[in-house]
Image (cartoon, grey):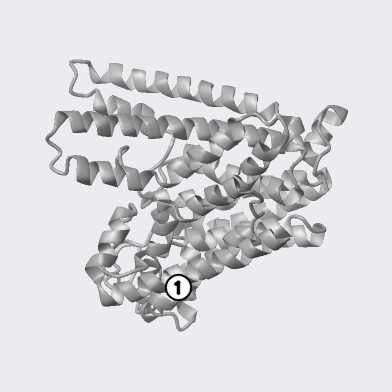
């Protein structure tokens, strides 16, 4: 217990000290502040918490009568607002851009506390892996931007703890999951945790969610269409991650070759099919480790499901900015616990190491792109960059396949699986 409580106290304390140190450095020596963050893989704006500012400025402008989806002069970059229309209801509160620093710091501190509340590492190796993940570029980027994904992480952490309780507590958890989905849509996939319920309770949860979702779409239909049209999409070679990066990015790299575009597109589709086959094969191999899964504590197993649902769902839904990698923190305790078991296969610890690599990936990419060949004219350097990109994308597919296997094991243990498969389904963790 001493080690666990030391971790739970030490993570928020260290995070708060680091945040304070960077705040002082920003005021005392902005150039050094900028240089350290760039070396960390984060390219900072001229002031911290730019994404917090985006939300607060949209609320500010909406209060003044502007339509932030089309015209947001309150924003430092005049960006179109592309978050949930529900957030704009905050115009009834005295929220202004002047709150930017306070809200950004509060989000960071809540994130540290939430991360520390996850199942604590037990061994030195596990603590090192978790510490590297918490110090990663993904986490630093989310905090520097003050992105709303930090709030999503906090709310889903609370929901994950509530999912361990009685049905009343689990109902609160489902309400929190729906609330996060209304804020940023993609957390809706976490409602798959309701598969643990009995068929009657699952039907009640689905009915309630459907009613809330229908009311939300009916009320905000126009704004939702505008918001979804503004979802960012970009290069396959930056920090954006997603299933289409590798097949379409490889096709883009091969564009200079004398090959008809339609053949490149067909090749991209064929490669995507091969990658999906590889991912499914990996997932099935991992899911067969059911005996190892049964050794996990309930909290570890539930947070594993939450993290795997988020990462796999986002990976296949579209391109995602690198800070969304903070949700890997939900999965790591399970992978480390599985790797700790007697005669455990190396697949779980390897997956944890690959996740840490992905969470630091932007630091490696920035180092290559800005130090190896900043002008982009050296052919050998360009080959090294392409090789790194290919490695990163292959690692993504391997990790997603592993997480898919964890999801198969989770679904197989749920109440829905017991109802559908009868005695053939594992009974683990069914409420």
Can residue 280 be seen here? The reply is yes
Q: In the image, residue 338 lies at what x, y percent? A: 67, 38
Q: In the image, residue 350 lies at what x, y percent? A: 54, 34
Which one is in front, 396 or 388?
Answer: 388
Can residue 88 be seen here? The reply is no
Q: Residue furthest front?
A: 124
Report helix, strand or loop for mark 1. helix
- What crowding class fits label 1: few (fewer than 14 Cα within 10 Å), some (14-19), or many (20 or more)? many
Which one is in front, 227 or 375?
Answer: 375
- Residue at image position (58%, 66%) is 10
State the image quarter where residue 60 is shown.
bottom left
Q: Is residue 86 left or right of residue 254?
A: right
| Above or below for 146 versus 285 | below
- Residue at image position (47%, 24%) is 275
State the image quarter where residue 392 is shown.
top left
Quadrant occupied by the N terminus: bottom right
Q: In the image, residue 36 lies at what x, y percent? A: 30, 60
Which residue corresponds to mark 1? 105
Q: In the image, residue 201 lies at what x, y percent? A: 80, 50
- Residue at image position (29%, 66%) is 33
Q: Is residue 13 left or right of residue 54?
A: right
- Residue at image position (38%, 50%) is 231
């Amino acid at each position: 217990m001493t080690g666990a409580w030391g971790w739970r106290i030490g993570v928020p304390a260290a995070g708060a000290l680091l945040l304070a140190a960077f705040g002082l450095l920003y005021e005392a020596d902005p150039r050094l502040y900028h240089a350290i963050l760039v070396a960390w893989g984060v390219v900072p704006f001229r002031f911290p918490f730019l994404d917090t500012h985006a939300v607060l400025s949209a609320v500010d402008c909406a209060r003044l009568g502007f339509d932030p989806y089309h015209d947001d002069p309150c924003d430092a970059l005049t960006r179109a607002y592309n978050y949930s229309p529900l957030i704009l209801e905050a115009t009834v509160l005295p929220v202004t851009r002047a709150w930017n620093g306070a809200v950004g710091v509060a989000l960071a501190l809540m994130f540290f506390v939430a991360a520390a509340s996850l199942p604590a590492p037990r061994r030195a190796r596990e603590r090192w892996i978790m510490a590297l993940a918490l110090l990663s570029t993904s986490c630093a980027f989310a905090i520097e931007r003050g992105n709303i994904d930090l709030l999503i992480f906090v709310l889903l952490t609370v929901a994950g703890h509530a999912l361990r309780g009685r049905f009343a507590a689990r109902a609160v958890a489902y309400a929190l999951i729906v609330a996060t989905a209304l804020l940023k849509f993609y957390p809706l996939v976490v409602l798959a945790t309701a598969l643990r319920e009995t068929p009657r309770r699952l039907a009640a949860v689905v009915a309630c969610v459907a009613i809330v979702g229908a009311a939300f779409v009916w009320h905000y239909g126009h704004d939702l269409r505008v918001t979804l049209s503004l979802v960012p999409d970009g290069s396959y070679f930056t920090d954006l991650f997603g299933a289409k990066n590798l097949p379409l990015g490889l096709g883009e790299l091969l564009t200079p070759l004398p090959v008809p575009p339609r053949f490149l597109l067909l090749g991209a589709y064929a490669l995507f099919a091969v990658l999906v086959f590889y991912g499914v094969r990996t997932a099935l191999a991992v899911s067969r480790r059911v005996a190892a899964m049964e050794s996990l504590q309930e909290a570890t197993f539930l947070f594993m499901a939450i993290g795997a649902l988020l990462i796999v769902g986002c990976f296949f839904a579209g391109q995602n900015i690198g800070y969304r990698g903070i949700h890997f923190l939900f999965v790591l305790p399970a992978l480390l616990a599985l790797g700790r078991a007697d005669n455990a296969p190396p697949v779980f610890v390897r997956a944890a190491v690959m996740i840490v690599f992905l969470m630091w990936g932007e630091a490696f990419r920035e180092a290559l792109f800005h130090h190896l060949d900043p002008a982009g004219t050296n052919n050998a350097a360009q080959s090294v960059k392409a090789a790194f990109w290919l490695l990163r994308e292959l690692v993504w597919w391997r990790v997603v396949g592993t997480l898919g296997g964890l999801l198969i094991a989770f679904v197989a243990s749920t109440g829905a699986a017991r109802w559908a498969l009868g005695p053939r389904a594992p009974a683990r963790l069914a409420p």
